[in-house]
Structure formats: C-alpha cells, structure tokens
Image: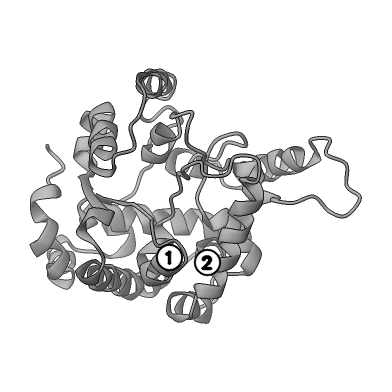
Amino acid sequence: MTQALLAQNPACRAPVFWEMHRPVRFPDEPDDGSRRESACRWIEDYYRRAPDEKAAHLMDVDSPDECLRLLQHNFTTLIFATRYCVKTYPKWLVNADLRPAYRYHRQLLQLQLHTRTGAPLVLKDPFHTWHLDSLFEVFPDACVVQLHRDLRQVLPSWLRLCAIAQGVSSDAVDPSRIRDQWLPLVEIGLERMAMVRKIAPSRAFLDIAYSDLVRDPAGVIRRIDEHFGFSFPEEAYSRARSWLARNPRHKHGKHRYSLEEFGLETGAIRERFAGYYDRFGPMLDEAR
C-alpha cells in the first residue's frame, strides 16, 4: 500500500509490473505491447495455479511491484528463494556480495528513466533488509521507510506466502521445512538492518507502524513527505485518496495464516527476536 500511495505523486516514477518483468525488448522485437501482454499471461497463469496468493500479494500488470522483478534478471531474487525448495539458494542469496546485482538493478532503472531523468523513484522489496549496505553503496541518497508489525503476525503471514508459492511448483509443501529455513534468515536480516542503521544517517530512515498505515494511510504518506522533504503537491494526496477508495483493504479476500500451521509459539518468537521487540516494541501494538 505504501508504495502505491507514494506513486500517486505525478512527479515520482514507480516502475510497474510489466516494465520489470520484461525491461527491454528482444533484438528486432517491435514495440507493439507484446512485453505487457507477456506479463499479463504470466500473472494470469500464476494466479490460476495459486489463487490464494491474490489476497496475500496482489500483482497487477500496470501497477508498481517489488524490486525482485528486476533483481530476478541477475538471478538474485526472493522469487526463487520462496518458490523453490532449494536449501542452499536462500543461504547463498542472503550472504552473497550483491553490489554487482544492485549495480545492474540501477542500470535497468536508468534504462527505464531515460526520458525522465531526475524523477524520484518509488521502490520496495523486503529483500533489501538483508543487503542495505549494498543498496546504500549503489544508491547513496536512498530514503528508507521501514514498516513495523508484530513478528507474531509477520512470520506466519510470510511463511504462508512461501507455502502458497511453493505449491505452484511442488506437490510436497512442508510447513516445518519452510519455517526452519526462514526463521534464521529473518533473524540475520533484522540483525543486519540494525547494524546498517547504526552507521547510516538517521534522516535516511523513517519508522512507520503498520497499525498507523492501516488506520490513517493518508496521514502516513504526509509524515513520509514531511520527513524526507518530497514536497508532495495536493494533487498527489487527492490521487492517493482516490486510490484508497478504489482499493479497500481485503478487496481480493483476506490472507489467512496461523502460528499453529508452522509450529510457532508466541513466546518463542518474542524470545528469539528480543532485540527487535526491545527497540520497536511500542510500534508493534496491533490494536492501535
């Protein structure tokens, strides 16, 4: 939601799904909309095989999507880590030197921006959690909005999304295997983000409670605007309100998940991620 609302600013640029799915034409390929049609077919086929994912993560061919769509062209993406049960790939992905991948990511963005040089980019991807150091090296003026939600909600939601994705390519989805793979990786990601935040300029980050976003999305966008000095015009806020009216919460169904499905316990999560709860606990109250 945050990316979609920020993208309502006409001065900004947020690459949409089809642009990232097929960022360049093949040699001698006409510019006839075939890349967009290819992305449409991909989304339709994916949701045919994973209908439950639409409630968890909506993909629309003409709407902004996550950076993983560009990073996949360099084989460095959460897409492969979540969809296929290859134990060594996620470990390699979170520990690899991804500066070359981010440089290629930047080149693809420059290609898409060649007619709008200087337009602020609106990007998102949970994958950046593990590699903020590489991101800041390649994008030194990046502004990071970190959304916070209780991990007792985040973890089963994420694991359920992984289970849905694996179900597309496998008929042997094991919730306990998914849990054992991802819990230590999430732990590593949060630790790395904390380390980067110790040395990065504090103004480069803004912490937002998920509950605030749900309760007052327009107010959150205004806070982001004021913190980073984006100077959103009133037109951007009007467009954001229209987007919210067209896209109410749970429009495509409710993403259903539970701790029990993955053998998780609230106390164990609180203990394992104590550092995160100690720092951001006041922002994690789901009732707010």
Query: Label 2: which residue?
Result: 102
Q: Residue at x 35, y 22 (%)?
A: 237
Q: Is residue 137 visible?
A: yes
Tell me whether the residue at label 2 lies in contact with that at label 1, contact meaning CB atoms closer than 8 angstroms: yes
Question: Residue drawn at (19%, 63%), measured in percent from left and top?
Answer: 265
Residue 29 percent across, percent down from the top left: 88, 47
Indicate the amino acid at tag 1. Leu
Q: Quadrant of residue 279?
A: bottom left
Q: Secondary structure at mark 1?
A: helix
Q: Earlier in the sequence, mark 2 or mark 1?
A: 2
Q: Is residue 19 above or below residue 194?
A: above
Q: Nearer the viewer, residue 10 or 98?
A: 10
Q: In terms of secondary structure, where does tag 2 sit?
A: helix
Q: Is residue 86 above or below residue 259?
A: below
Image quarter where the N terminus lies is: top left
Whole-percent x, y for residue 33 in the image: 79, 35
Q: Residues within 10 Å of mark 2 (few under 14, many from 20)?
A: many
- Residue 17 in the image: state x and y as whole percent: 60, 43
Residue 25: x percent and y percent?
A: 80, 50
Q: What separation in Å lies between label 2 and label 1 (alpha carbons)?
A: 7 Å
- Would residue 176 be seen by someone viewing this image from the given angle? no
Q: What residue is shown at x 59% (from left), y 40% (from top)?
A: 116
Mark 1, other Cα within 10 Å: few <14 / some 14–19 / many ≥20: many
Total marks placed: 2
| Residue 149, numbered label | none
Instruction: Name the residue at 12% across, 37% down.
Output: 288
Q: Amino acid at mark 2?
A: Tyr
Q: According to the image, label 1 marks what residue?
A: 135
